[in-house]
């Protein structure tokens, strides 16, 4: 199974990552962040030999452009504002779920110290698709949804080249 997280960060601080930047990692009673929870569980399952997740391909969505139906580039510079501490409520709940799935405790113990920034950085270590590379939201979604599995294993430059030519290639297949 391929985990395809949508990483978004809108101008107003919203989006899947905007909320993570606002997490209070010093408050043990703060709410579990559901997006962070999904990311932690996906990374743990990918790292576990018996886990169902074999690959991760993030979709990076920047702010919507005013001049078109497309998106601006993903704001990578904002990643520096993510907390560099672990969000204990989320990591503990992830550990609970992973235990229920049968993951060995020795593997679960590792996630306790994963900071919010570590988790997002680990997700972004995987080759992904940036919606800004497409002229419209519709094209970005259709192209991302129709990527063949072999593209997930390509080096970043090759994937970028394939994405640039994929609409034309797709018609030939």
Image: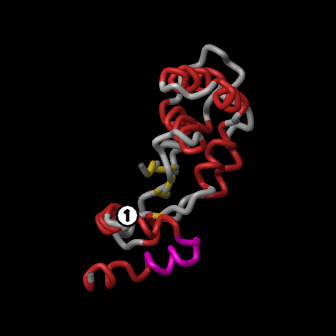
Q: Nearer the viewer, residue 173 or 86?
A: 173
Q: Residue at x 70, y 32 (%)?
A: 110
First to last magenta residue range: 154-163
Q: Residue at x 53, y 29 (%)?
A: 33
Quarter occupied by the C terminus: bottom left
Q: Is residue 35 above or below residue 77?
A: above
Is residue 156 highlighted in magenta? yes
How many numbered circles are shown? 1
Q: Residue at x 61, y 27 (%)?
A: 104
Q: What crowding class fits label 1: few (fewer than 14 Cα within 10 Å), some (14-19), or many (20 or more)?
A: some
Residue position marked by numbered label 1 in the rendering: 144
Q: Quadrant of residue 103?
A: top right
Q: Where does residue 45 sit, x and y in percent of width and height?
A: 54, 39
As drawn, is 142 to the left or to the right of 78? left
Q: Main secondary structure of the magenta part?
A: helix
Disc 1 secondary structure class: helix
Q: Quadrant of residue 158?
A: bottom right
Q: Where does residue 145 sit, x and y in percent of width and height?
A: 33, 61
Is residue 144 highlighted in magenta? no
Q: Where does residue 6 sit, x and y in percent of width and height?
A: 45, 50
Q: Residue at x 37, y 67 (%)?
A: 147
Q: Is residue 117 above or below residue 101?
A: below
């Amino acid at each position: 199974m391929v985990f395809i997280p949508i990483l978004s960060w809108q101008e107003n601080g919203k989006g899947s990552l905007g909320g993570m930047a606002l997490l209070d990692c010093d408050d043990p009673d703060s709410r579990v962040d559901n997006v962070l929870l999904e990311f932690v569980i996906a990374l743990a399952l990918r790292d576990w030999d018996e886990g169902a997740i074999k690959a991760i391909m993030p979709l990076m969505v920047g702010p919507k452009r005013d001049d078109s139906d497309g998106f601006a580039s993903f704001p990578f510079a904002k990643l520096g504002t993510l907390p560099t501490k672990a969000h204990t409520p989320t990591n503990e709940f992830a550990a609970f779920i992973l235990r229920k799935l049968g993951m060995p405790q020795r593997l679960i113990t590792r996630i306790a110290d994963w900071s919010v920034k570590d988790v997002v950085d680990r997700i972004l270590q995987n080759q992904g698709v940036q919606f800004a590379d497409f002229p419209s939201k519709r094209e970005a979604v259709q192209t991302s949804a129709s990527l063949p599995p072999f593209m997930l294993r390509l080096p970043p430059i090759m994937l970028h080249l394939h994405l640039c030519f994929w609409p034309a290639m797709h018609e030939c297949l």
